[in-house]
Amino acid sequence: MTLPVPPDLPILPAPRARALVLLMNPDAPLDGYIAIVEGDPSLTLSVLRAANSVASWPLQPVRSAREAVIRLGLAQVRQIVTTAVLRSEFDRVDGAGIDADELWRHLLGSAVLCEAGASAGIAPEAAFLAGMLHNIGRLVMAVQSPSRYRQVVDAAQSGTDATTAERSLFGIDHATFGARICERWQLPPEVTAVVGGHHSGATDPFSLTLTQARSIIGGLGIGDGVHRPDQRDPAMEEHPLLAKVDGREGLMAEIRWFREATTSRHGTPPRRMAG
């Protein structure tokens, strides 16, 4: 019998760890955001790409981090930086059997819908982060041990519950591991709780918002990188939460915009819809 080998808790580069913590502070000053972006060339590129893609296309291209941050606004910069940090650190899951394209669409869609559905008492920045991070445990397992995670994917696609397969091979499931990662990164306790409990049936408002977002994403036919939905659920296209982001087309446009802004390729991404 093969004993499970636990994954290692990932350590973010110090500047990026500080960036995530700062971005959770709704009172963080403009200069703090600018310093984060200017101090990391890949974040500078992402923010510049985003600033040059908005619907109110600038007459002259935005060329500096400061100008880009001011143009986008702190909320959008926070989203772009959060997405760029995660994609740059955990984008490579080659050999793990995960459909990376599907997984990132799932995470981005969940983040956008979580933020749109954030109710009183749930900070929008925390909602977006929880949506982006709820499968961070899966990403880290796949990056660290691709061949072992492929066994999880194979088991899941043969009918075994993925979390059961993860516990068998890693000694921990991705939700529990994800919560430990959030703790290691000193993220807000409410984000840690939602990430760790997203398969537990938790009924607090924050957890229900993520559950709702994930259900809508699945109903639109987007899988989580391991499972593909059996079929699309037309009823989800009429969901009130989806209407908050201008329906399916609006959500898919948001997902494309975030992915293009945080890719490593050069060039200009498609324009983002205003509003």
Image (spheres, grey):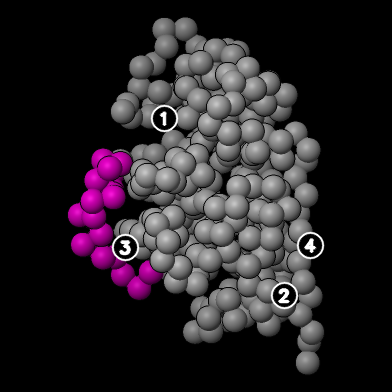
Q: Residue at x 36, y 46 (%)?
A: 119
Q: Position of residue 222 (x, y in %)?
A: 40, 59
Mark closer to the observer (2, 1):
2
Q: Which residue is mark 3?
A: 219
Which one is closest to the eye, mark 4 or mark 3?
4
Q: CA distance from mark 4 to mark 1?
A: 38 Å
Disc 3 from disc 2: Cα separation: 30 Å
Type of amino acid at the residue the image marks with label 2: Phe
Mark 2 = which residue? 170
Q: Residue at x 29, y 65 (%)?
A: 232
Screen quadrant of the C terminus: top left
Residues 78 and 42: in front is 78
Q: Earlier in the sequence, mark 3 or mark 1?
A: 3
Residue ID at (27%, 42%): 244
Mark 1 residue type: Pro
Badge 4 element:
loop
Quickly name the residue at label 4.
8
Q: Going by the picture, which residue comes out furthest to the bottom?
A: 1
Count of numbered circles on the image: 4
Q: Position of residue 165 (x, y in %)?
A: 62, 80
Secondary structure at badge 2 equals helix
In this orientation, does residue 256 appear? Answer: no
Q: Crowdedness of circle 4 by 10 Å Cα count: few (<14), some, many (20+)?
A: few
Looking at the rendered structure, the kind of residue marked 4 is: Asp
Q: Which comes before the other along the chain, label 4 or label 1?
A: 4
Q: Tell me the quarter of the image containing the N terminus.
A: bottom right
Read off the residue under disc 1.
Answer: 270
The mark that comes first in sequence, 4 or 2, is 4
x then y, percent, for residue 66: 59, 14
Distance of mark 4 from mark 3, alpha carbons? 33 Å
